[in-house]
């Protein structure tokens, strides 16, 4: 079973390309997507046992990725949350670290690093007991 991945990204082209790339190169298993803060928060909390990785953009159609990150603070130890943003500045990286984010990647020049991260997580991933 691949890394069960949920993506919160409002740009449909980026979201679709990211899903296809990560499925092909990193072997992720997509479990859903959202375009807005409320939608992303609601799904991740309601389906807490059904995801291993959440990839979150910070600027969304409604709300902010920061709200999604806040909603994921009490996740299980095996669950990872990463940010993929065009605004991966030092200040944003610091704020994300304060919210317990596991990694931050810049959309413009760190996609390969994101793929490598997913491959590494997938190779060490084991589903928790009872899932």
Image (cartoon, rainbow, N blue to C red):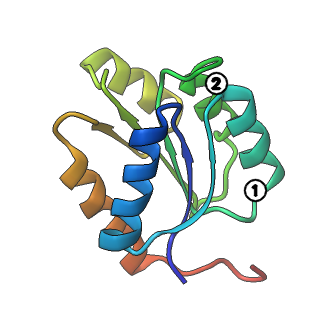
* Front-lying residue, 118 or 14: 14
Q: Horizontally, is 111 left or right of 1 in the view?
A: left
N-terminal of the pair, mark 2 or mark 1, is 1
Q: Position of residue 17 (x, y in %)?
A: 37, 51
Image quarter hosting the C terminus: bottom right
Q: Is residue 90 above or below residue 102?
A: above
Secondary-structure class at tag 2: helix
Residue that lies at the very extreme toward the left in this rendered image: 109
Q: Looking at the image, which residue is at 74% across and 28% down?
A: 38
Residue 120 is drawn in which quadrant? bottom left
- The reply, left or right, for residue 33 in relation to residue 129 is left
Determine the secondary structure under disc 1.
loop
Separation of residues labelled 2 and 1 (CA atoms): 16 Å
Q: Dividing the image into 4 quarters, which one contains the N terminus? A: bottom right
Residue indicated by mark 1: 48
Question: What's the residue at 59%, 21% (across, down)?
Answer: 61
Residue sitting at 61 percent across and 79 percent down? 127
| Residue drawn at the location 78% of the way across and 56% of the way down | 47
The residue at which mark 2 appears reads as 67
Look at the numbered discs 2 and 1 and tell me whether their residues touch, using CB distance below 8 Å. Answer: no
Disc sitting over residue 31 in the figure: none
Classify 10 Å Cα crowding around label 1: few (below 14), some (14-19), many (20 and above): some
Pick whichever, 4 or 89, lies toward us. 4
Q: Position of residue 111 (x, y in %)?
A: 24, 48
| Residue 124 in picture, x, y percent from top left | 41, 78
């Amino acid at each position: 079973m691949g890394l069960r991945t949920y993506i919160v990204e409002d740009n449909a082209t980026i979201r679709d390309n990211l899903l296809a790339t990560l499925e092909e190169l990193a072997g992720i298993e997509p479990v859903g997507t959202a375009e807005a803060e409320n939608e992303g928060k609601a799904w991740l909390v309601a389906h807490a046992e059904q995801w291993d990785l959440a990839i979150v953009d910070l600027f969304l159609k409604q709300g902010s990725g920061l709200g999604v990150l806040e909603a994921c603070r009490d996740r299980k130890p095996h669950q990872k949350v990463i940010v993929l943003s065009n605004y991966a500045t030092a200040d944003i990286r610091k704020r994300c670290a304060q919210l317990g984010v596991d990694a931050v990647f810049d959309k413009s020049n760190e996609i390969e690093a994101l793929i490598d991260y997913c491959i590494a997580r997938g190779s060490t991933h084991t589903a928790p007991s009872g899932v």
